[in-house]
Amino acid sequence: MPKRIDHDLRRRQIAEALWRLVAANGMEAVSLRQVAAGAGVSMGMVQHYFTDKEEMVLFALSSLTEQVGRRVGEALADQDDPLQRVRAVLVQTLPLDDERRLEARVAVTFLARAPVDEKIAAHLRSGYAEGHAYLVEQLRAAGVPDAEQEAFRLVALTDGLTAHTLAGHHAPAEALAVLDEHLARL
Amino acid sequence: MPKRIDHDLRRRQIAEALWRLVAANGMEAVSLRQVAAGAGVSMGMVQHYFTDKEEMVLFALSSLTEQVGRRVGEALADQDDPLQRVRAVLVQTLPLDDERRLEARVAVTFLARAPVDEKIAAHLRSGYAEGHAYLVEQLRAAGVPDAEQEAFRLVALTDGLTAHTLAGHHAPAEALAVLDEHLARL
DNA sequence: CCGTTTACGATGCGGTCGCATTGTAACCAG
DNA sequence: CTGGTTACAATGCGACCGCATCGTAAACGG
């Protein structure tokens, strides 16, 4: 076992370069050469860490969901009211600052690709299923009726607000206001 | 003025081939050659009708919004209750049958591209602004409070449900149920 | 009938793509 | 110190890309 290299760290660095590329120029801009350039490494190195482009893209996706999941977990730590927990989860996916704007851009790009890419769709489904289950749990604890349906509604609303904010249809603050007003009525 | 050819008809035919390509394989699959093949014409002909790829793509987008707008207008014809009008508009954009599924796939693809393509973003903004204005008008007529915000919420919710339905997160019928339940509470 | 204009089809060019191959330096076990 | 394995860098290949160019057939105005 020669050369002490943190394999997974390198892969995450490459994945982050891919995120930046997707956020700045969309999925069409993703190529082995562009990702390598964005990460400041050679194309040969990218090939060394990923067997092919598809694996790289899918790793970048799971790497993203992992990061978002981690941040959601942190945001949940100091919340004990169920409805506040629901809000914390949803707010973490809105593009309210630069970091989340990047994540949101990448996430929306992948979401739009899911209908034509079963691997991406499957990954997203499992992530959404997890989030949905958690929201249902908290909504029930808060005494919200129709928790199942309300969870679907909240996630769809938040994703829609995210997409529209990124498209410039309204300001981030407006999106947050729309979400908060909806939560207030529960 | 030789050859009596319906210029705009040909352009729409090419645009529809582009839709099918986007719906089936995403925006990355769009190339002059693939569009030409999908439309059953030569690549030279596509070049004859569009100065470049960008113009073709933007025409395909406005052609789509035009078609959806027309269908919404028809659906509105036999509705006089304001809330039913709101519902009619929104339901037309959900992927409830094959035709609308194709439209929705294309629409979501363009929406996801808006953050990195200002021309697309501008086009979508004007379309959404028009829809928003109409919804606000109808919501006010129905006596719904906070009509401005509620219109934003409804459109975001519907688009989110559309994206999630296309991604396989839930069935079309579930999306409709989530929307209808929300409308019932207004 | 003829010249101009439109409507294409065909071809080619420079560039980029994903990927395979090859070369090489670094490291460690024996 | 040597053989094997890892970690890259470099290069090349065939496919595809957008786009420009060229040739030509068809329709009309004169």
Image: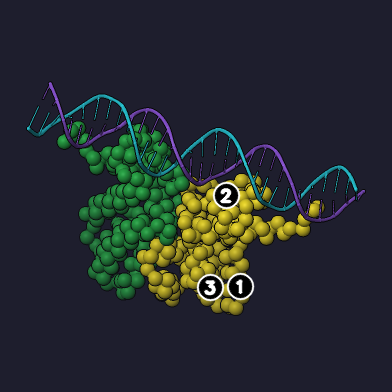
Chain colours: A yellow, B green, C purple, D cyan
Residue under the image location 33 percent in, 50 percent down: B58
Residue type beneath disc 1: Glu
Q: Label 3 to label 1, Cα distance in Å?
A: 10 Å
Q: Which residue is mark 2?
A: A32
Q: Which residue is mark 1?
A: A74
Residue type beneath disc 3: Ala
Which chain is mark 1 on?
A
Of labels 2 and 1, the one closer to you:
2
D5 lies above or below B181: above
Label 1: element kind: helix
Residue type beneath disc 2: Leu
Query: Which residue occupies the foreground of this view, A4 or A86?
Result: A4
D24 lies above or below A172: above
Q: Label 2 to label 3, Cα distance in Å?
A: 36 Å
Which chain is mark 3 on?
A
B28 lies above or below A62: above
Q: Could you say which quadrant of the image residue D12 lies in? A: top right
Q: Which residue is mark 3?
A: A88
Residue B31 rendering spot, x and y as whole percentages: 42, 42
